[in-house]
Image (cartoon, grey):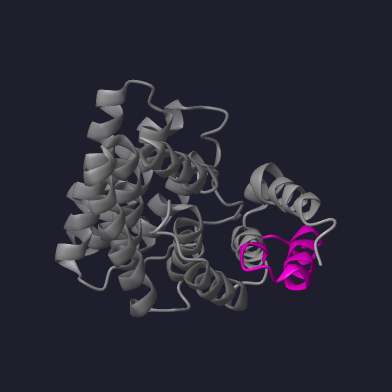
């Protein structure tokens, strides 16, 4: 029971830090088709106001599903965009059965993207997050199975293109997974490795920075932990500003208090 509680707490933490839409002026996703690019921009704007207007998620899902019918040449991209928007809607759903159904739809659309293109970074990434959420909902045995599937999806995302934004995020999420799993599944050395890679690829990704500081702390590398957590707090242009403000910076301050008297 204790392991199950820790597993659930882990996934709540992981997904909470990924909930808020990044503050890009334009969508970070691109298409060679001008009309599809316009749809991506519309979808991104809808996603960016989800914290103010939850109906924007339904509008976004409808937008992408309609585009799937009109632009079959971009079916892979639009499939995982449906998955992305559906995932966000699932996290806002309060009914447990509907919530699970939406996560399974997220997984379904992610897998459709992967079937169309096995090298779909977006497909593998959103499939990984869907497995993480399904692990939270499942019992401990099923949950562990979903965790392993999630890790495989994140590893695939990284291997496809280490510089892709989803690969960098995958490193940060894998670090959080290895930090938060109950013994004996947790692994601070692996968490350190993944977080260091994410920080190397994107020094402004405060999610990776705070995870790296925590890994150093767990490994009793107190000076390194202080340096990284202070660097996290001094980040002037974080990649995902709201995540930094709401979650990562408060987390860094809390960890710094834990090591005030550590040597």
* Magenta-colored stretch includes residue 226: yes
Position of residue 25 measured from the top left corner of the image (x, y, whole percent): 61, 54
* Magenta-colored stretch includes residue 96: no
Q: Residue at x 72, y 67 (%)?
A: 225
| Quadrant in which the C terminus appears | bottom right
Position of residue 226 measured from the top left corner of the image (x, y, whole percent): 78, 65
**Left or right: 115 in relation to 101:** left
In terms of secondary structure, what is the magenta stretch mainly? Answer: helix
Residue placed most toward the observer, 60 or 91: 91
- Can residue 245 be seen here? The reply is yes
Segment tinted magenta in the rendering: 217-239
Residue placed most toward the observer, 100 or 24: 100
| Quadrant in which the N terminus appears | top left
Residue placed most toward the observer, 16 or 121: 16
Q: Residue at x 59, y 63 (%)?
A: 208
Extreme residue in the left direction: 115
Question: Residue 223 lies in what quarter of the image?
Answer: bottom right
**Left or right: 156 in relation to 17:** left
Task: Tell me: residue 59, above or below residue 33.
Answer: above
């Amino acid at each position: 029971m204790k392991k199950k509680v820790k597993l659930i707490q882990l996934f709540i933490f992981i997904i909470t830090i990924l909930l808020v839409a990044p503050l890009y002026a334009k969508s970070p996703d691109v298409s060679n088709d001008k009309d599809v690019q316009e749809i991506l921009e519309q979808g991104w704007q809808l996603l960016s106001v989800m914290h103010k207007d939850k109906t924007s998620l339904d509008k976004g899902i409808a937008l992408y599903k309609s585009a799937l019918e009109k632009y079959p040449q971009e079916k892979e991209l639009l499939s995982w965009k449906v998955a992305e928007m559906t995932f966000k809607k699932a996290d806002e759903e309060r009914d447990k059965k509907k919530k699970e159904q939406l996560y399974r739809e997220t997984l379904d659309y992610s897998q459709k993207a992967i079937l169309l293109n096995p090298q779909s970074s977006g497909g593998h990434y959103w499939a990984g997050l869907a497995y993480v959420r399904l692990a939270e909902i499942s019992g401990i045995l099923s949950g562990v199975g979903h965790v392993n599937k999630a890790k495989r999806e994140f590893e695939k995302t990284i291997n496809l293109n280490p510089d892709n934004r989803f690969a960098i995020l995958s490193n940060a999420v894998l670090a959080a997974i290895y930090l938060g799993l109950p013994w004996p599944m947790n692994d601070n050395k692996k968490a350190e490795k993944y977080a260091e890679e994410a920080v190397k690829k994107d020094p402004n990704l405060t999610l990776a920075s705070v995870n790296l500081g925590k890994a150093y702390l767990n490994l009793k590398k107190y000076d390194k932990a202080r340096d990284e957590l202070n660097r996290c707090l001094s980040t002037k242009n974080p990649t995902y500003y709201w995540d930094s403000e709401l979650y990562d910076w408060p987390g860094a301050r809390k960890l710094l208090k834990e090591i005030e008297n550590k040597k």
